[in-house]
Image (cartoon, helix red, strand yellow):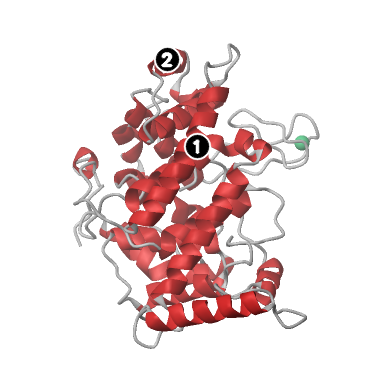
Amino acid sequence: MSDQKLPRPASIALALHIFATSLLPLTSPTPQFPAPAHQQSEKHAVAAAAKSTPRLWPGSRYTEAERASAIRRGLRFIYGTARDEQNFAAYGSDYLWCFYTISESVGDAAVRREARRMGLERARHWRGTHRELPADADAGMVADFAFGDDAAASLGLRDARLRRELRRAAARFTARDFMKFDPATEPPPSDVPEECEFDRAAHERGSTHCRICQRPLRMRTRQDVWYDALINAYVGERAGIRLGAGYAEVFRWLPALRPYLGGEGGANAEFYDTVYALTHVVYTLNDYGQTRLSPRWLPREYEFLRANLREAIRARDADMLGEFMDSLRAFGVTEADAGVREGVEYLLAHQNADGSWGDAAERDIYLRYHPTWGGVAALSDYRWRGFSPRFARVKNLPGVRVPR
Ligand SMILES: [Zn+2]
């Protein structure tokens, strides 16, 4: 669900540390002294509530009440971090999108209401700080404004004047400005450098060495470049602001990313971005959890997701696991599936004491709230509203539908 830079896979050592220090949902840190009486009775009440609600499935270690509580705690963690000025300045548009999509997609009406309340409060704040586009805005800033404007409008807070301004501004940039390549004329390229990891300098496509420190630059994968473009095109079409190219124009390069390879025991450096490319095929087709997809539409993509779900558990990567799980749910995979059950139990066993998922020692707040969003999404039931209407826009593109 990322609209931002990809989180990096957590190192195994850190993941083990989280494992060792993580707490089961509904438990509190082991008290050094006997808990006061009111806490003890609270504990009993919680235990009684857990007993009186059904297990997730026969033999599951967890109950529906524990899952519901884990989802709430995750959502509140996200909101808590979104209320921090610095965090919100950096990731405001993404936070709004998170609250909006949860407020529309999940089955639990109380969670939807809570997400909407959080989203509206943050959207008002975002509107207050984004009344107009700075005159020197580059393509990245225009896109970020468009993302925030679309999310705030989706939550019900519209600003017609800003949208007109964004439409005008976006027209001044090319597809390469927004997407690093032009989907009208070329497939996703493999010569787009990452920013220099030492001095954060950005470089033109085709650069191989940093112009500041002369070190070699790492290249972004084609998958990464492509799904970034897909998100831009998707949001652009939602908002009626063309951010480089249309959705179908980008989507038509999906066959160029096949065949999809698994992790190959760590040998496939493109595995991670392949997962995110395919989960974003799902998200952009189904508005992040609002409608279903048929496995018959995209059999290769479906089979890849199904076959590799356990890689995320093996990697102890809550973010990637979340992406796998809600994508598979969109394809109709249910909790009767052994892999999904494993994923649910993994997430319930590895929620941090503060309600987050992922590496609790991570400093970049994106890598704290985004895996938590993934955990919330992966544990949630969805209220599907039919099948994705957007698939009709892309199904006749050459090679998109692959007969079995
Ligand atoms: Zn450098």
Q: Quadrant of residue 214?
A: top right
269 horizontally vs 108: left or right: right
Q: Quadrant of ligand 1?
A: top right
Q: Nearer the viewer, residue 121 or 285?
A: 121
Where the C terminus falls, by quadrant?
bottom left
Q: Quadrant of residue 138?
A: top right
Q: With respect to residue 378, does 350 lie above or below?
A: below
Q: Residue furthest right?
A: 213
Q: Position of residue 52 (x, y in %)?
A: 38, 82
Q: Which residue is mark 2?
A: 171
Q: Nearer the viewer, residue 187 or 20?
A: 20
Q: Nearer the viewer, residue 310 or 382?
A: 382
* Residue at image coords 62%, 33%: 89
The amino acid pointed to by label 1 is: Glu
* Residue at image coords 45%, 48%: 1
Tell me the CA gap for discs 2 and 1: 31 Å
* Residue at image coords 36%, 27%: 239
Q: Position of residue 40 (x, y in %)?
A: 62, 80
Q: Which residue is mark 1?
A: 121
Q: With respect to residue 180, does 60 lie above or below?
A: below
63 horizontally vs 264: left or right: left
Tag on residue 190?
none
Q: Judging from the image, what secondary structure is the residue with disc 1 in? A: helix
Mark closer to the observer (2, 1): 1
The amino acid pointed to by label 2 is: Ala
Could you tell me if residue 184 is visible in this image? no
Q: With respect to residue 222, does 130 lie above or below?
A: above
Q: Residue furthest front?
A: 37
